[in-house]
Image (tube, grey):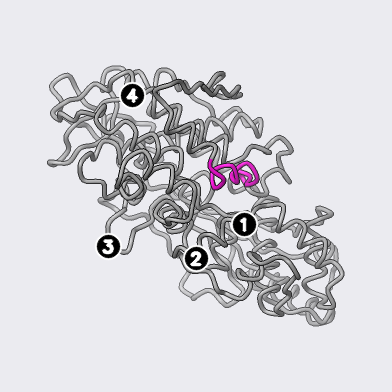
Amino acid sequence: MKTFRDPVHNLIAFGPRDRLIVDLINAREFQRLRRIRQLGLSNIAYPGAEHSRFVHSLGVTHLMRRILDAGLEQSGFGENLEEYREVALAAALLHDVGHGPFSHALETVTGVRHELFTTAAIRAPRTEVHQVLEAAETGMADRVAQVIERRFEPSRAVVKLLSSQLDMDRTDYLLRDAMMTGAGYGSFDVEWLLHVLRLGEVDGDLEVGLDLEKGRSIAEDYIMSRYYMYLHVYFHRTTRAAEVMIEKLLARAKEVEAYLPGFTALNTLLSGGFEADEAGVVTFMELDDGMIWTAMHLWTRDPDPVLSDLSRRLLNRQIFRGVDVTDREKEMALRERLLRRADREGLPHEYYVITDEAKSAAYKDDYVAPDVSVGSQPFSAESRIADATGGEGAGRGWTGADGQGQPTERVYLFDSAGRPHELSQVSFLVDAVRHKQLRVRRILCPEEWLDERE
């Protein structure tokens, strides 16, 4: 019925049994994901990173279906995954449908996490994805949204397969981002990972884990691939600087009310009018990468010097330079020098001298919180700190309005008797990196300002 040639998984084919998935693929909200890059502005640093959230979502669905159709060996828990096959596949396909262009930069403007737009789009009667789901079975849309919200009680396995430390979302984006950027150190043996996946019981709850005897090495590869992808791709200095510039661009456009005739969705964004309700999500679905890039072209002629300058810089790849700072005294000296330059140029500090901190951890558990403090002073208004806990940025550990939604950050290996063993307790390699938070702190400014010597 529908076959896609994919660089990561080769052929992704959907047959008669996947009629619902094919209909969802054809829905306009899902087709919009073709116009949303998976890695936002990473193509500025890695020219091959042009892949979309559309193809990533297909990959997640493909992996989920492989697990469900092959049958996942269970230790201590009996769940009939086949019963929830359609719900699981629909949730895998639609889990990113609420992403906007340059998603996490956009979230700083809307103040709404993309997961809320995702579930709102699935529940909104006016969207095609909702209509397809309800045509398949009454109540299907709400069940799919519950899986994404991590509160689908009929099957905890389905929830964990989509969102946990060892989920199909992370598995696909790590492989895909490594391949498309050319960063080979982010790859791992996905076939063996799928082969040794297990379901088991930990403290009365179901967890997705790996076979103890066969899965230790692939678990280490998986964790280390995350570490290297953060270090070399997601936190790349040029990518991070470009993302900050997009945030500042949109913030400035909002500040000066740079509305554009005919750009209803963008104007709604700038006016702060987006709500994660039916009317808001229908308008939100008009936003894509192309709309923002087109707006930048128009804003190069805007009378506001900051908005026009940031637009020109992004369009022409004149990206701010990031200077790593580890010494507080040197950092303050650099900031003071750059602030004086901004004053001479007549430019506002918050748009041209920016403190950026990216932080994450290759592996962490939930019984000792990693230290995320930086110094003793609070950050100033010019600071911009991002806690990226997923390959595409922030959002992995989100919590819904009901207080649920926090995924486990432990990886478990199950022995032949079904007993769980936490990964860092059986792997000296993972134990060595446990709680070692990956943190990069930089001062961002126009590159030509760094050539000045006082």
Which of these two is toward me, 279 or 11?
279
Q: Position of residue 299 (x, y in %)?
A: 80, 68
Side (left or right) of 78 relative to 7: left
- Residue occupied by mark 4: 216
Mark identifier at residue 279: 2
Mark identifier at residue 286: 1
Q: Residues within 10 Å of mark 4 (few under 14, many from 20)?
A: some
Per the model, the C-alpha gap separating discs 4 and 2 is 48 Å
Q: Position of residue 161 (x, y in %)?
A: 33, 35
Side (left or right) of 436 relative to 330: left
Side (left or right) of 438 relative to 251: left
* Label 4: which secondary element: helix
- Magenta segment: 27-39
Q: Look at the picture and state if 343 lies above or below 55.
A: below
Counting labels gives 4
Residue type at mark 3 is Asp
Q: Is residue 414 magenta?
A: no
N-terminal-most mark, 2 or 1 = 2
Residue type at mark 4 is Arg
